[in-house]
Every structure is written in C-alpha cells, then in structure tokens.
Amino acid sequence: MTKDQQKIRVANTDIILGSTYELIGKKDFDAPDGFQNYNTTKYLIPGIAEHKSVSFDETIMLWDTGFYEHSNCNKTLVPEERSTVVEAYKKHIKDPYEKTYRVDCSESNDEFWKSYNYELYTHKSFDTTNKKDLFDLYHILKQGKACEVGEKDYTLDASANYCIRNIEKAVSLQEEKSNNKFEAITKFSVLLETTDFEEDDTLYTILEWMNFSNVRGADKESIKRLIQKAFEHDKTGYDTSMRFLDALSMSKDSHAKKEMEMFSILNKLNVRRKLEYKRKQYFLNEELLGNTLKEAAKSSLSNPDKKKKILDEYEKIEN
C-alpha cells in the first residue's frame, strides 16, 4: 500500500482502493474430504455462480445497506466511530457508484434494491478502481458472504462460504517465497560443492540442527538428493528453505554455532542411547538436561559443569 492509497475497513477486511481482490475457497472442516482437499465449501464447477442480494430490515422497513448509521449490518461498529466509518462508505463507495450509473442507492429505494444483486464464485476478481466491482465487494463483505483467511470472528467465519485475498499482496508474497527458496537452494548447493567434510563439518551441523538425521558421513550426492527433495516438497518446501537460511545465519555467529555444535553432540549421545528420555525430559546419568535437546544445548553453554559432563560422555563414545 502506498501513502497515496485510501483504505476502508469493511467487516474485518481492509479494502485498499486501487487494489484487486479475489474470492477463493474457504476450508470447511465439516465437509467431505474432497472439499477439504480443495479448501472449499462449494462445488468447483466452471460457470456456476451464486447471486445474492442485500437483505431487507422489516423492523424499520429499510434495506440493510450499511450506508446509514443504524443499518443492522453496522451494529458491530464502535459507536464512537460509526458516523465516520459510514461517511467513508458513502464517500468512497456509494456516491461514486450512484454518479457513475446514475442511480439512487438510498436505503428506501425499493426499485433499485429489489433488482440489485452481486455474483459470487471461486476466483471471481474485483478491481476496486471499477465502481461496480468496489460496490459489489463492499456488500459481499458487509453481508458476511466472504471473510479473511483464518478469520477469528466466529460470526463472520460461520456465515462466509468464501475467503477474500488481495491479489497484489498474494503475488508479492509468492514472489518473496520463490526468491527465498531460490536463495536457500543456491546457498546449499554452493556450500555442499565447496565444503571439504574432513576439514569443515558446518554443513553437517546445519542439517542436524534442522533435524535431518544420518547425514554425517553420507556422500555428497546422497545429501544433495535428500535436501533438494525437502526443498521441493509442495507443502513444507518453503518452511524447509527458511529453516536452512536461519540455520546458515546461526552458523556464522560464534556463540550460536557453539549451541548448534553442542546440539549435534547431544544428538549423537542420544542415538548411542547414552541419554535417557523419561517424563518428556532428557537425562544424562540421572542429571536433567532439558525438555528438548536444543534446550539442553543452549543451557549447557551457560553451565560449565553440565557442559563438561556432556563432553566427557561424548569423548567416551568417540574413543
């Protein structure tokens, strides 16, 4: 969002004027597996759309447009801010629509609201520079037909069959993820090809910190296949790449690297069954090390006595 762009909050979504939004599937955990696999509550059939209209409030005999303060869909607005918010709705959404299409959108105009409806289907986009798209998007959100991914408001989440996303932000995030993943793959490949494992075990330490077991002593081609497969995984590849970049950064800090190396030692002790795991805690000769091996590694650096006991035990298995 640039400093020149206007932002309007509708329900729990910030509409950035000038941006394009898209309806996407909303995962329904009560739906059959086929629906859950595609993150949707709706059949994904091309050309099938829903048409919805603005509701009529029979208690006050007005259309529930949100363009007046006591509109029922405005009841969740903070009372002290309601007037300002509604004025923004009218200024940026209602008035431009009326001017462009030469219509009267007042809440008592039965002729307009009886014929007005908006269309919903998966991947429908809304260009907020287009007055009708912005008008439709506003009502979709205001009437609770779509919500943010991971919406925390139960009422909004329960009523919505679709989620909404800002396409520009989604593209930007995807580009960032792709760049980070490419960086991880490149740095891993360079480190793998240039490292002499007999002189430098940094890459082993990094991979062990990432919980890749049995890499120490493996040939480079095996390590390459293992890690590239992890980077390319559809669901966890990005997280793996970020974990690698974080671990690589840690390995360049002297104190953090010592923690990683101590973790590697503890891992070896655990594999050789020199540690005992009971009550969800790790022990060495009945002495508590920590709840996790990483916790144990970190605490040992500030506890010389604990560190010595770990290193002494490690020496036994290495000699």
Image: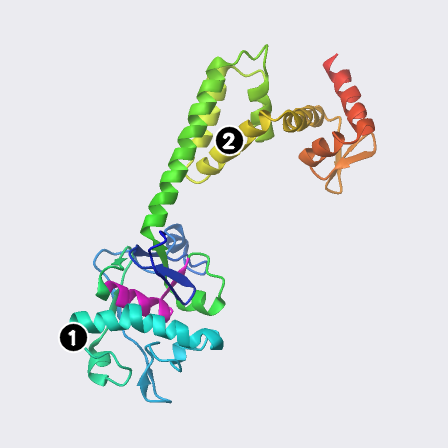
Give the overall secondary structure of the magenta segment: helix
What x and y, as percent, mark residue 34? 37, 53
- The one nearer the camera, 115 or 78, is 78
Q: Which of marks 1 and 2 is in front?
A: 1
Tell me which residue sits at (49%, 18%) in the image: 192
What x and y, as percent, mark residue 49? 24, 63
Of callouts 1 and 2, which one flags the residue occurring earlier in the amino acid sequence?
1
Q: Name the residue under label 1.
A: 102
Is 79 on the left-hand or right-hand side of 65? right
- The one nearer the camera, 2 or 130, is 2
Q: Mark 2 points at which residue?
A: 245
- The one nearer the camera, 113 or 78, is 78
User: Which quadrant would residue 312 be assigned to in this image?
Assistant: top right
- The one nearer the camera, 199 or 14, is 14
- Three-letter amino acid code at disc 2? Leu
Is 90 on the left-hand or right-hand side of 148? left
* Span colored in magenta: 133-148
- Three-letter amino acid code at disc 1? Arg
Determine whether the residue tagged by mark 1 lies in a helix, strand or loop: loop
Give the total number of marks visible in the rendering.
2
User: Which quadrant would residue 233 be assigned to in this image?
Assistant: top left
- Residue pushed farthest front? 4
Tell me which residue sits at (39%, 44%) in the image: 173
Tell me which residue sits at (42%, 33%) in the image: 181
Is 246 on the left-hand or right-hand side of 19? right
What x and y, as percent, mark residue 61? 32, 89
